Structure formats: C-alpha cells, structure tokens
Image (cartoon, coloured by chain):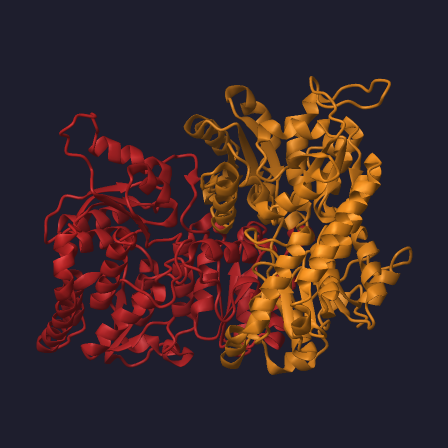
C-alpha cells in the first residue's frame, strides 16, 4: 500500500519530518545533513502570529483548473482567500485561453445547526446542484476544519453521489488544524487528482516495465514540466523554450491544466520538478504506478541553478551537448546584459524570505547579481533543501542567520532592525514588515512577472535596479509608520519564543 | 440563490469581520484563537476584495494567533491561549487587545471568557468575542466585536453629553470605502454641531471610545449591520439609536441630516444652514457638467449589485439625484425576512418613485436570469431594450457587464480592480465622487 491508497495523504511533519520553528545559521543548516539536525525534532513557539494553512495553496491550484468548480465544505469564511487568487486566475486564463475568466468557488457555508447535526446531507445536495447549474468537467470537494472536527466523511459523500452526477468528483482534504506544514496542500491536491483521475487507468507492467494510463502510449521525448501556482505563464514559456532546445516536447502540469488532460502526465518519459517542495508526493506516484521517472533536484531560479536543472534533464536523454550549447549561449548573453546593473548592486545587503526552496534558490541568484545575503527566512524546512543550504554555505564568505518560520513577522522585524539590509525580497502577503521599516522591498513572486530561468534572472535584476534607483516610497513609510511591537522586543533575542528545538543564533 | 451553497461569497466569516474590526480600532491588536490559516485567509481575502487595502497597524499575518493544532483539539486550547495572551502583551504594543475565537476553538469548547476575564482583572485593556465562522459572516463578526466593546470596555454610568454621538454601521475593509464613508458623515455631523466618536478613524482615540457611553445618540449607518450592538448599547448605557441607510448624494444626505438633527435635538435652523451651504457647493460643482451630461446623453439604465448597505443606497442616489434608471437592485447578502423588509421599505419611498425591482440573490451568476425575466428580448428591430446600461456592483459583476455590453464600476466588496484609500460615496461630497467615477467610466475611451 502506498500513500495514494489511503483516504487522506499523511501530513508532512510525519512523512518528511518537516519543521517550522528553528533559529539557525546557513553553516549550521548546511552541516545538518546526516547529523542529528533540527529535522529530528521541530521547535515550538510560545508566541505565534497567524499564518496560512494548507487550504490556501491548495485553492491556489484548484481555482486555476479550467472547467472545474471548487466546492468548499466548511464555514463561510474558508475559501474567501479565492478573492485574491481570482486575480491570478483571470490573468492566467486571459494569457492562456485568450479570455479572462473568474474562477468558480462555492461554499456549503456550514452553520451552527450543521455543526451539531453534521453537514453531509447539505454537501450531497450542493454537489448535485453545482453539477446541474455549472455543468463542469469536475467538482473538487474541499473540506475545511469544521467537517474535519465534527467528522463529516467527504469521501463517503463523494462515493455515494458520484453515480448521480456527470462531473468527476475529487475529494481534497484541507483540514487546517491537522497539519502545521502548509506544503501538505500539494499532497492533498495531488492525492485527489491521483485517486480520482488517474488510478483507474493503472495497468500491470509489461516486459519494459510500467505503462501509461490505459489506452495511452508512452511519449519518448515528452517531459512533464511541473508548474506551481506562483509561476506565471512567462516563466513557463522560458522553461519550455529551454527544454525545446534539448529537442523535448513539454506537457505543463497541473496548474491551469484541464482536469481531463491530466492523464497525459502518465505518458511522459520524465517528470521535471521546478520546486521540490511542491512535487515529490505526486512524482513518486507517477513513478511507482506509471513508470514515469522524476527529476527533483534544483529550482531553475538563478544562473547556476538554471544550468544545473537543464543539465540534469539533458543527462536523462543523452543530450548533454545540446544543454551545454544552450547554457553557454544563454549565459554569455545574460552576463553581458547584467553588467549595467552590477555597479548599483555590488555589495548591497539583502534579506530573503519565502517558501524554502524559492528563498534558497533566489538567495543564490542574489549572490550572482552582486548582492551579499545577510539573512534568510524559510517558511519550513525539510530534507529536500539540504543541498541548497550547502550551495549557499559554500558560496558565502560569512555565516548568516536562517530563520525557519511559518512567516512570524515579529522575528523578522527583530532581525531586520539588527541587520539593516539594503533590500528585502519576500513572499506575496509577507512584505509589509520590511516595507514599513523603510527597506526597499520586492515580491519574490507575482504571477505576472518573470522570475525563472535566464529571462527571469534578467528581469529580476531589471526590476531591482528600478526599485533601488528610487526607493522613496519605502523610505517615507519607514519615517512615518511604526510596527506594532514594543521597544523591548527589539532588544530581545529574535528566537526568544522558540521554546523547544533550540535557537542557535 | 441556492439552499445548498453560496457562490463566491462577497464577505468572509464572522472571525474575519471581527479581526478587521479590531485592527481598525486605535492601537487595536486582534488575538485569534485559531488554527494558523485563519489569519492568512483574511489577508488574502482583503488582498483580493478590499480595494488594495490589506490590514493596518496590526492586521494580516502580523495578527497574533494561537495556531492551535490537533493536540489542542484533543486536550483543549485554554492553556495555549493563556500562554499566547501573556506573550502577546510582552511583544505587541497595543491600546486594546481583542481575543477572537474560531470554528475549531468553539467546537472544542474552549472557555475564552474566563481566560480573558483573568487578564482584564489585571488591568489589561482586553475584550473577547466568540466569532466562530459557522456563526455567520463578516458583518456578524463586526457586530459581535462592537457588542463586547460596549459591554466590557466602555466606562459605565457616565453622565450624558447632549452633543455627543457615536457613529458606526460600516464595516472596516469589507466595505472598501469605509474610511471615506465614515469621514464624510462625521464631517457633516460636526458641521451641525455634534461631537462624534466614530471608533475607526484617524481622529478617534481609545480614550474617546472608552467614554462612548456618554453619548446621547447612536447613529447606525445601516439597516442591517451593527444593530445587535446598538440594542445592547441601549440596554447597558441607555443611549438610544437611529438606524439610517447610507446617505449617498444630496437628496439622501439632506433627509439624513434632518432625521439625525431631530433625533439629536439640534436646532433645525443650524441643520438648514448646513444643508443649504453644502447643497450650494454641490450644485455649483455640478453646474459645469451640465453641457456634457446632456450632449453626451449620459443617462443610463442600471443594475445595482451590492451588500445590504450599498445596494439600495446607490439605487436611491441614481434614481433620486442622477436621474438614472436603476431597474434592478440586487442585494447579495443572505438576510432574514425583517432585514429584507427594511431594505424594501427604502426603495418604496424614493422621491422619484422609480420602480426598482429589489432582488435578494447571493449568487452573482444568476443575476442575468433576473434581468432576462424583467427585460425579455425578442430580437425584433424596434424593441425597447435594456440600454444604454451600466452595471454598478463588485468586481465579480464584470462578467455580467460584459454579457450585456455595459460599462461597469466596482463599489461593493469585492473591489479587486480599484485602489481605494479615503474615497467614499457618502454625503454631498461622496455623491460628487460617485458621479465622477460613473461618468468617468462611461467616457474612458473618449
């Protein structure tokens, strides 16, 4: 039995020993490999600020799916985050399908009575009505905390109702209180896709090994390019171009992919991750059941990382020479183009905050652009990133702080006041603290902008150059606003409230 | 409207409204007793719906939150909450702290009342409200926070000050125009000689809020939101209230000021003189619009879609001031029968007597069906069709506007496609703003 045979996927703190509370340094994180590191026991905070739960990134993916209705089974608030995700959906569908379209998300809006009597019947009726009203290809039935805590069985409901409706029903478990690692979201979504859309097409192996979805052929030069909902079309196009230079065809999956087309993922000769935090669960499934091997090493952000990523792919197809040609051509052109920005960047100190892999890959890029990294906050930590910490420990001349935190802006405020960086790069919805401290701040992702590959490296540099040419907006904010922390807090250790697992900085 | 689901709800849950409300108080620090995701959900909701405003002094992911996990569900979250509040007081610099419960912590039966009471006893400026998402929407959460503020924070038994009034009924962030809307009404009330506490504006202070019980009148700018709090206020502090629709533009504002003036015992001559001078300014500014308004034929049919505060108020402005034809008014909130009746009453008494059809429909994608029913098309050459038209609603009503080939303006949550800072549509000045925004949209391609 593998995970996909279970009703719900395991949480990542169990599956990967992922952790969210640790104060360390880049050298210490890099040395953690193979030793008893923070991975063995996560810390705890005795003071915490709000964060997100797995529901939010899960909806980021689900809202993007064309011809799908997101049916939230929870109280009315769960899923209202879709209002901001809808901007991505509109932009993304506009650029991919030529027409900006609103996502469809609906909610059973469980009330006090439902909490007492259970909400399964309401959910059944909601599925039937949504199927008739919207006539979608699929309905993703997403459970929030309330059904999780009162014991509604959404899988049972889906099983009962599926024969009565045309839409394919995908249960997706997002009970926020059950995992502190929001990256469990990706597993939850992939779990639903795998169990509902793919599992029925699994076949017994033939002499060559495992086969694609029943009725489909293996495509020997097609690769799955795993996108993420924080990736815009412009980034996909950059990677597609690079893979085409290796004479490979590309199947982009799963964000904005039509649910009906998801079976195509089983035909590919290789799955290529762009973010190991995102994909390991599903890539393991594709490999174990459909014989699609996976590459899950580097994130193609930054010059060196993009090259490593591309070389890995090329090696699988014996096309190393193609890769070298592309890399040399791209790097030569890019490095010449970056020269005009370097004088402004050289030696400037930067703090980086984001999902672990994105933060680390971007840190490497910042070094390549001439910045000095003075601190990193990763939203969680697991084993996939160890190699990235090693890269950074090697490339940096000085040790610097690494805060493993599911955001926790109070630690960040404390660190930023000490470090006084010249630039802050942070995840969307996590840039207010640095901005209000007067630090020039840039978003580490925004789905309309380029970040990935050689094109992304140039465009980030171009945007940072623009920002640093006139950082007045942030400077004036810093002069006129204050953050909601007591003065004493800035004098305390930033990791005062990490009570177990230990702070080493 | 479906009995089984709500489509793309134009609000979030009670806790979300409550959190935005505490954030908007002077020095307000919300403390969520929640799983980790509630704060982020509210931040993303505001990001997508509140006219590019997210948070404030302490909002978004800065809000303290107990981040309860599975083990707290098993063993109870009281001790985690106690620890969280203690440490919040060490780290966060606030003038008032508001503990807000969530679905999870209410289902497991955490006793926040006694935990909050422990801290209150020590002199901490703290309130608590039970705002589980399954109790209702963001408007409900707003009301619940005001209730605990009135019950547990305001000083009691203060002597009444005849000139003093309190003003509420507009929800921070979930009405993206809340600041501008409150500011203009406050300005007008001050013009007629009243001292105003409006809780959430830059010129409010925690001290004036503490003294709010000394007011002689409470003015609730809503027929639906904040009324539970008004009842409770009257019960505890004996101050009566008037519940009045959002006054947009000259006609509505004139009658609003007369009603309030009367209720607050303001000399009617003073009210008249303020109305006269404001109206003079209003029409002086409209005067030079007249040529273009006429020459460009800027009268429009309209569909108005909004929450319980905005829908009927905008319709009244269109019908009674601008002379537009608001054929259909859609309220997207799920309301109780008496609340629906109050909104119906508003449209029954339009000065223009324009017959707008009021529909209660939570699902935006159904509005087109209501329009087709009222304005069926038969494809004939000489049919009197619904046009030229305009859709005034939320950014979710753009698809409707595209479908009927009409321009569109977002004025009600979600407003994803506009930046709103201190813009408001209330009062005389707000009426002018709304005319600017409507006509500006019509002539954008000129």
Q: Say which residue appears at 65% left-offset and 80% top-offset.
A: A490
Q: Is residue A464 above or below residue B93?
A: above
Chain letter, red in picture: B
Q: Is residue A128 above or below residue B348?
A: above
Q: Say which residue appears at 20% left-offset and 40% top-offset.
A: B387
Residue A431 located left or right of residue B312: right
- Quarter of the rendering containing residue B153: bottom left
Q: Residue furthest right?
A: A35
Chain letter, orange in picture: A
The spot of residue B264 in percent (x, y) is 18, 73
The spot of residue B376 in percent (x, y) is 21, 29
Residue A19 located left or right of residue B297: right
Res. A381 in view? no
Number of residue marks = 0
Q: Is residue A134 above or below residue A451?
A: above
- Quarter of the rendering containing residue B31: bottom right
Q: Say which residue appears at 86% left-offset and 18% top-offset.
A: A207
Res. B28 in view? yes
Image quadrant occupied by the N terminus of chain B: top left
Closer-to-camera residue (A320/A354): A320
Residue A129 located left or right of residue B326: right
Q: Say which residue appears at 27% left-offset and 57% top-offset.
A: B440
Residue B413 located left or right of residue B274: right
The spot of residue B181 in percent (x, y) is 30, 65
Closer-to-camera residue (B298/B190): B298
Closer-to-camera residue (A119/B384): B384
Closer-to-camera residue (A367/B324): A367
The spot of residue B429 in percent (x, y) is 23, 68
């Amino acid at each position: 039995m593998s995970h996909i045979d279970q009703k719900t996927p395991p949480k990542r703190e169990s599956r990967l020993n992922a952790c969210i509370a640790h104060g360390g340094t880049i050298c210490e994180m890099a040395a953690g490999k193979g030793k008893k590191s923070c991975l063995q026991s996560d810390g705890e905070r005795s003071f915490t600020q709000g964060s997100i739960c797995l529901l939010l990134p899960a909806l980021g993916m689900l809202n993007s799916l064309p011809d799908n209705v997101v049916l939230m089974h929870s109280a009315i608030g769960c899923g209202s985050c879709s209002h901001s995700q809808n901007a991505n959906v509109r932009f993304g569908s506009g650029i991919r399908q030529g027409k900006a379209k609103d996502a469809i998300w609906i909610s059973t809006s469980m009330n006090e009575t439902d909490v007492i009597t259970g909400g399964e019947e309401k959910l059944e009726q909601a599925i039937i009505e949504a199927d008739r009203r919207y006539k979608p290809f699929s309905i993703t039935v997403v459970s929030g905390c309330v059904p999780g805590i009162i014991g509604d069985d959404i899988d049972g409901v889906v099983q009962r109702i599926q024969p009565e409706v045309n839409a394919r029903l995908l249960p997706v478990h997002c009970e926020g209180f059950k995992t502190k690692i929001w990256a469990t979201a990706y597993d939850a979504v992939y779990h639903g896709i795998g169990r509902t859309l793919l599992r029925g097409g699994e076949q017994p192996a033939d002499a060559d090994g495992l086969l694609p979805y029943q009725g489909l052929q293996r495509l020997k030069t097609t690769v799955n390019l795993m996108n993420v909902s924080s990736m815009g079309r412009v980034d996909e196009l950059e990677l597609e171009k690079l893979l085409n230079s290796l004479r490979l065809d590309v199947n982009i999956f799963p964000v904005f992919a039509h649910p009906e087309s998801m079976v195509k993922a089983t035909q590919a000769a290789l799955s290529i991750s762009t973010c190991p935090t995102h994909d390991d669960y599903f890539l393991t499934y594709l490999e174990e059941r459909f014989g699609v091997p996976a590459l899950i090493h580097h994130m193609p952000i930054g010059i060196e990382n993009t090259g490593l990523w591309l070389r890995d792919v090329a090696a699988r197809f014996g096309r190393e020479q193609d890769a070298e040609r592309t890399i040399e051509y791209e790097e030569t052109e890019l490095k010449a183009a970056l020269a005009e920005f370097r004088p402004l960047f050289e030696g400037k100190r930067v703090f980086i905050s984001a999902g672990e892999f994105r933060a680390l890959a971007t840190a490497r890029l910042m070094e390549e652009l001439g910045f000095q990294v003075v601190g990193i906050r990763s939203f969680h930590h697991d084993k996939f990133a160890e190699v990235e910490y090693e890269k950074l420990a090697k490339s940096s001349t000085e040790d610097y702080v690494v805060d493993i935190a599911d955001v926790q802006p109070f630690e960040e405020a404390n660190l930023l006041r000490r470090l006084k960086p010249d630039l802050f790069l942070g995840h969307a919805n996590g840039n207010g603290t640095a901005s209000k401290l007067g630090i020039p701040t840039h978003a580490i992702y925004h789905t309309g902008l380029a970040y990935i590959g050689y094109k992304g490296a140039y465009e980030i540099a171009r945007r940072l150059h623009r920002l640093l040419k006139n950082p007045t907006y942030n400077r004036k904010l810093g002069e006129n606003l204050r953050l909601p922390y007591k003065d004493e807090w800035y004098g305390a250790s930033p990791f005062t409230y990490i009570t177990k697992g230990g702070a080493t900085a | 409207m479906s009995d089984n689901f709500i489509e793309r709800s134009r609000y979030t849950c009670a806790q979300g409204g409550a959190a935005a409300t505490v954030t908007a108080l002077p020095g307000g620090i919300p403390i969520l007793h929640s799983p980790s995701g509630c704060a982020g959900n509210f931040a993303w909701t505001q990001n997508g719906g509140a006219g590019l405003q997210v948070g404030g002094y302490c909002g978004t992911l800065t809000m303290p939150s107990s981040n309860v996990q599975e083990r707290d569900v098993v063993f109870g979250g009281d001790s985690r909450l106690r620890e969280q509040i203690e440490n919040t007081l060490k780290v966060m610099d606030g003038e008032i702290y508001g503990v807000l419960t969530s679905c999870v912590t209410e289902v497991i039966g955490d006793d926040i009342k006694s935990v909050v009471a422990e801290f209150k006893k020590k002199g901490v400026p703290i309130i608590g409200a039970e705002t589980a998402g399954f109790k209702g929407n963001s408007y409900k959460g707003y009301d619940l926070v005001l209730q605990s503020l009135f019950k547990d924070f305001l000083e009691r038994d203060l002597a009444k000050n005849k000139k003093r009034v309190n003003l509420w009924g507009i929800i921070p962030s979930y009405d993206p125009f809340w600041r501008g809307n409150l500011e203009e009404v406050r300005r007008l009330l001050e013009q007629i000689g009243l001292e105003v506490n409006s809780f959430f504006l830059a010129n409010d202070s925690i001290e004036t809020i503490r003294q709010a019980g000394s007011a002689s009148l409470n003015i609730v700018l809503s027929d639906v939101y904040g009324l539970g709090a008004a009842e409770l206020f009257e019960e505890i502090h004996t101050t009566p209230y008037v519940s009045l629709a959002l006054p947009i533009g000259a006609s509505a504002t004139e009658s609003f000021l007369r009603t309030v003036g009367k209720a607050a015992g303001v000399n009617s001559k003073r009210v008249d003189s303020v109305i006269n001078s404001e109206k003079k300014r209003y029409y002086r500014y409209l005067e030079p619009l007249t040529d273009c308004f006429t020459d460009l034929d800027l009268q429009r049919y309209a569909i108005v879609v909004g929450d319980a505060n905005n829908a009927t108020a905008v319709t009244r402005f269109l019908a009674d001031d601008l002379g537009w034809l608001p054929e259909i008014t859609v309220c997207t909130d799920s309301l109780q029968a008496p609340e629906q009746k109050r909104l119906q009453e508003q449209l029954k008494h339009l000065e223009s007597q324009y017959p707008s059809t009021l529909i209660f429909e939570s699902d935006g994608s159904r509005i087109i069906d209501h329009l087709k029913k009222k304005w069926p098309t038969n494809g004939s050459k000489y049919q009197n069709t619904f046009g030229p038209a305009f859709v005034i609603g939320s950014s979710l009503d753009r698809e409707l506007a595209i479908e009927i080939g009409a321009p569109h303006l977002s004025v009600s949550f979600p407003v994803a496609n506009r930046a709103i800072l201190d813009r408001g549509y209330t009062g005389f000045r707000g009426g002018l703003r709304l005319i600017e925004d409507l006509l500006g949209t019509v002539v954008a391609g000129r």
